[in-house]
Image (tube, helix red, strand yellow):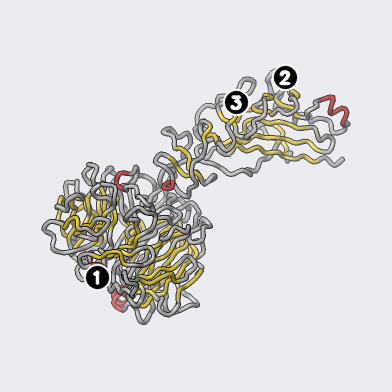
Amino acid sequence: MDVRIWLALGVAALVLYGCSCADGPLDCPSGQRNDDGVCITPIGMDGSVDEDSGPPTMPSMDAGPKEDAEICASGLLCGTPAMCCAEGTECIQGLCVPPCASGVRCGDALDVCCESGEVCVGECTAPGDPCQDAFDCPIGDYCEPALGQCIPQFDTVTCTITPNFSPFDVKLEWKTDTSLVEPGCVHPITTPVIIDLNKDQKPEVIVNMACASPVNRGILRALDGVTGEEKWAVTNPGAEFYARASIAAGDLNGNGFPEIVGLSYDQRGIAIDAQGTVLWKSRDALGDPLTLGYNDGAPTLADLDGDGKVEIIWGALVLSHEGILLWTMGSGVYEGTNNGYTGGLSAVADIDMDGKPEVVSGRRAWEHDGTAKWTGAGIATDGYPAVANFDGDPQPEVVLVTTGNVYVLDGLTGAVEWGPVAIPGGGRGGPPTVADFDGDGLPEIGVAGASSYSVYDPDGPQDVLWSKTTRDMSSNASGSSVFDFEGDGVAEVVYTDECFMRVYRGTDGTVLLEIPNSTGTIHDYPLVADVDSDGNSEIIIVANSNHPGVTGTCGQGDPSYDGIRNGVFVYGDKLDQWMRTRRVWNQHTYHVTNVFSSGEIPAVEVDNWSSPGLNNYRQNTQGEGVFNAPDLAIQGLDVTIKGCPKSVILGARVVNEGSLGVAAGVPVSFYYGTPTNPGALIG
C-alpha cells in the first residue's frame, strides 16, 4: 500500500521572548520532560520511555474509514497517551484547546490568543509603521526584518548574539572600473551617495565619475548595489557633471522616489530623477539660468521651512526643490570655502532649538530664511562645519575646520569654546567627523590634514587623542567616515589618502586594514553602508588614476606599490561578521537623522545630538536591536489520522522564543525516538 506521510508545520514566527538562547534550565509543562532542551511527552503510560523498545507503533494503515471514525471522529490525536480532540479544536502543548482565529498564540503556556494582525513579543503587540531600519521607527523600537515593521525593543532582551570578531580580513565584493558608455569617464574623485532608486529594498550607488580628459568633466552613473552593474549614465549634452563637486540624493518633490542633485559641467545646479532623466538646471527668481560657479563644494538637502518640499543648500545659497533661487547671503556658494578650495559643505540643524533649522555654512550661521545669525568670534577664515553636543547641555556645538585649525563653537552665539588646535603636519584640514572614538561615552573629532589623520578630544587631558602619518599633499582637505564594525561602542575610522584606504582603531589609531588605493582627493571619503542588503555593512571607496601628481607620489615613489586604479570598489568582511547598518548615505553632511531609509527628507528633523546612540556626524550606525537573535523551538506535536489509510499528517508547532523574527517556512524533519536516541527518519 502506498502510504504517504504529509508534514504540517505551524510557525509562530514572532513569539520573541521567553528563553535565553537555549541556555539554562527549561521548565516543561506537566506531563512533559526536558530532553536536551526540548519538552517532550513520554511515550509510556506511566511517563517512562523505554529507549531500547524501538520506534513507537503507528496507527494501522489497514483500518477502514468506519474504524477511523470510531477511533477519533475529528481525526486529531493529541498528547500522550493520545486523546481525541473535539472537532474544530487545536492541539497545543499536548492539550486540546479552542482554536485561535489569528493563528498567533502568546504567553508561557501559549494560552493567549492574539488579535488579528498582532504578533507576540512577550505579549500581544500590534506592529508599527513600515520600516527598513531602526531610524524609520520611534525611539525605543527596532525594525523587525521578517515583518518590515517597527516593534518595541524591551529593556530586557531574552535572546542576543554578540559575535566573536576575527582580525579585519576583507573580500572584494564588486568593482566597477569600466563602462561601455563614455568609457574614458571612470575616475571618480568625489563622495558617492547610496540610496534606493526604484523601491526594491536594494540601494544603488550613484557616483560622479570624472573623465581622463578633461579631468573636470564628469558623468553621473547609477550602479547596482548588489553587483555593481551600471543601470544608467547621464550623457545628454549639457547634462554632464562637474567632476570635482560632490552630489546629494533625496526625494525633493514628495513623489516617493529620490532625485540626485549636483553641479553641472557648465556650473549650474542640476537635478536628475531616479531613471536618469534631467529634471532641471538652476534658475534665478526671474527664470533665467543661474550659474553657481564653485569648484569643490557639495549640496546639502533639508526642509528649511517644514512644508514637505526640500531645499538645496550650497554654502549660503538656497534653491527650491524646482531649482529656483530662494535666497543667497554673504558670498553665496563661496561661504565655507577653506583656504582657496571654493565651495562649502553646509550643515543644517536647529542649533538654537527654536523649532526651525539654521544653515551653518562654516564660520557663519543663517536662519532658515537667510537672516544672519552669527559669525564665529575672532575667526577670520572659513571652513567645514559639523554639529554635535560636547558639553552635555541641551544645545549643540559647531565643529569648524579652517586653514589648518580645529575649533568648537557655541551653537547659540558662535563664540569659541575650544581651540584653535593646529592640525599635526599642517594642511587645510578636511571636513570633520564626530563619533565616540574611545568608548568613553563622549564624542571626539576626526580630521585629516596634509600628512596626518588625527583624533581630537575636547574633554580629554590632551587636545589630540592620537595622530597617524598619512599622505594628502594634493588637497589636504579629504574627509573620513567612522563606523563601529564590531558593535562594541568604539568607532573605527575609515579614511582614504592619496595612496591607501585604511581602517584605524578608534582608541589609539592602530591600523586594522590597509588597501592600496589611488586618488587625487578633493574632499572625498569612504562610505559604510549595507549596500547589497545582505544584513552586513560594506566599505565603499572611489579611486582615480587621472591625476599625474598622485600616480607619481604613489607609483613612482614606491616601485612595489600596486594601488594605481580607478572606479568604485566595495569590500565586505570575509566572514560577514561586520555589524549591520543602514542602506542609505545620501549626502556629504550625512548624519543619520537627516534622511529616512526611503530617501525621504524629514520635514522636521530629529536632533541627532539628543537621539539615543547618536550624537555623531558622518557615522553610520546600527540602531536598536542590533544583537537581537532568533531561537526556534518545537512546542507540541500532533497526529491527524482523518486521511487514513491514504495519509497521516504529523504536526509540529515551531515557535520562536528569541528576539528576532524568522519568516514562515522553516523545514522540519520527523524521526522515531527521542533527541538523545533518534531513530529512523520518517519524513
Which residue is labeled 3 in the image? 111
Q: Which residue is mark 2?
A: 45
Looking at the rendered structure, the kind of residue marked 2 is Met
The secondary structure type at the circle numbered 3 is: loop
Q: Quadrant of the C terminus?
A: top right
> In front here: 305 or 259?
305
258 shown above or below 124? below
Q: Which residue is mark 1?
A: 342
In the displayed structure image, the side of residue 450 where residue 226 appears, left or right: right
How busy is the neighbourhood of tag 2: few (under 14 within 10 Å), some, or many (20 plus)? few
Residue 615 against residue 10 in the figure, above or below: below
Q: Judging from the image, what secondary structure is the residue with disc 2 in?
A: loop
Q: Can see residue 483?
A: no
Disc 3 crowd, CA 10 A, few/some/many (<14, 14-19, 20+): some
Q: CA distance from mark 1 to mark 3?
A: 68 Å
**Image position, residue 576 (x, y; %):** 47, 53
Q: Is residue 187 visible?
A: yes
Which residue type carries mark 1? Thr
